Image (cartoon, rainbow, N blue to C red):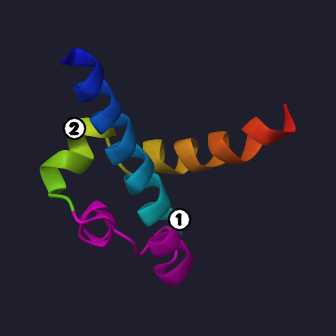
Amino acid sequence: MARQARAGAALTRARLIEAAIEVFSERGIRAATPEDVAARAGVTRGAVYGHVSGKPVLVAAIIGGLRRPLE
């Protein structure tokens, strides 16, 4: 059961990161809000903050994901 919860959390985090990429691309990082990302990902604002502490962490996750294939 715990494994399913972790898998679900990983999928939600991945959806949040993908949504953040889309929203940041459309609105710009400064103008975009965590609420915009939540709406795009189809989750609540609380779910966003359950996975990341804010916009800087989302930006770091995006950058980290871009760097991973290069390593």
Query: Cα distance, mark 1 to mark 2?
Result: 18 Å
N-terminal-most mark, 1 or 2: 1
Tag 1, which secondary structure?
Answer: helix
Report the residue that reaches farthest toward the bottom.
26
| Quadrant of the image containing the C terminus | top right
Could you say which quadrant of the image residue 7 lies in?
top left
Residue 25 left/right relative to 31: right
Magenta stretch: residue 44 in it?
no
Q: Is residue 32 above or below residue 67?
A: below
Report the residue that reaches farthest toward the top.
2
Quadrant of the frame with the N terminus: top left
What residue do we see at 23% from left, 27% from top?
A: 5
How packed mark 2 is, by other alpha carbons closer than 10 Å (few <14, some 14-19, many 20 or more), is few
| Amino acid of disc 2 | Gly
The disc placed on residue 50 is 2
- Decide whether the magenta segment is chiefly helix, strand or loop: helix
Q: What stretch is highlighted in magenta?
A: 22-42
Q: Nearer the viewer, residue 50 or 6?
A: 6
